[in-house]
Amino acid sequence: MLIFSVFKTLTDQTVSVELKNDLSITGTLKSVDQFLNIRLDNIKVQDEARHPHMMAVKNCFIRGSVVRYVQLPAEHVDTQLLEDATRRETAVQKR
Amino acid sequence: MAGLQPYVDHRVLLILQDGRAIVGVMAGFDQKSNVVLSDTKERVYSMEEGVEEIPLGLYLVKGDQIVLIGELDEAADKAVDLSTIRAEPLPPIRY
Amino acid sequence: MDASSSGIQEPFDLIRLSLSERVFVKLRGDRELTGVLHAYDGHMNLILSDVEETIMIVDQVEGAPEGHATVNVAKRKMEMLFVRGDGVILVSPPSRT
């Protein structure tokens, strides 16, 4: 739930999603759900010459389970807030 | 929230777990993101020859096989001469 | 220091005590990360900053006897990274030396 909330705060920011098939897609984060499925707008595939498969694709839905990494915009992530929220969430789970 | 509703009746590109790329018009989907496509074609990429399109007709894709669903810009897609595109097929997802 | 006084009763406590510290993460696919840990959850989804990734690429040399593969190492840096938990093999706290 915590990570889901983090992604929600990053809506309309630019992120890079790296998939487990080594495809990297950069785009504007439009929405996420509880499975961390991701919708991106204005997408650009890294190394498009090698991966022309998505040339005519403007926006996409990515299944959460195939994501390896998401590179986040550091200036929009409050690390202190994250650490406090993580401590709070783990305290709740223990109860 | 990151739903598939916006893609209904639109021409989409699906990337599957085994690396296949298929295009079709999304006729419908369900809670498990199973997807029904009409006028479906598989796009087979290779370095030896241009992209081959194999007609598949009406197709149901199981949700757990889907990596990514992208909305095709039909004008941009039609502008691409697939016979000139040379590329390796996308690698399969490796967990 | 026994387990109760160090505040470590279960494995996840070790990760909780590593918050805001540099950790080492081993991943599937011959990948390793080091980065500063800012968030995690029960799936071992992680958010790290100042990340360095190391990928081991094993090339089996043709004709060479088994076990004589050459290992190439690729490194890259990322400022802020979400790591999906299903790829995580281990998280190791910082070495306190």
Image (cartoon, coloured by chain):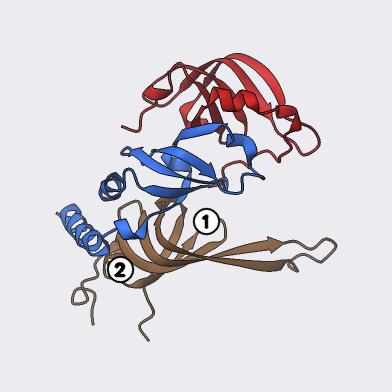
Chain colours: A blue, B red, C brown
Q: Residue at x 46, y 59 (%)?
A: C89
Q: Which of the chains bears the disc numbered 1? A: C
Residue contact between numbered discs 2 and 1, judged by CB atoms under 8 Å: no
Query: Is residue B10 or residue B56 the one in the foreground?
Result: B10
Quadrant occupied by the C terminus of chain A = bottom left
Give the amino acid type for the residue marked by disc 1 in the picture. Arg
Element carrying mark 2: helix
Q: Which residue is mark 2?
A: C14
Query: Is residue A16 or residue B81 the one in the foreground?
Result: B81
Side (left or right) of B84 relative to A23? right
Q: Is residue C31 visible?
A: yes
Query: Is residue A3 or residue A89 the one in the foreground?
Result: A3
Question: Can you say whether B7 is above or below A71 in the image?
Answer: above
Q: Residues within 10 Å of mark 2 (few under 14, many from 20)?
A: some
Side (left or right) of A32 relative to B35? left
Q: Residue at x 41, y 49 (%)?
A: A15
Question: Can you say whether A74 is above or below A30 in the image?
Answer: below
As measured in the structure, the alpha-carbon distance from the residue carrying label 2 to the one carrying label 1 is 21 Å
Q: Which of the chains bears the disc numbered 2? A: C
Give the amino acid type for the residue marked by disc 2 in the picture. Leu
Task: Return the x and y of residue C27 as percentages of the image width and height.
Answer: 49, 59
Q: Which residue is mark 1?
A: C28
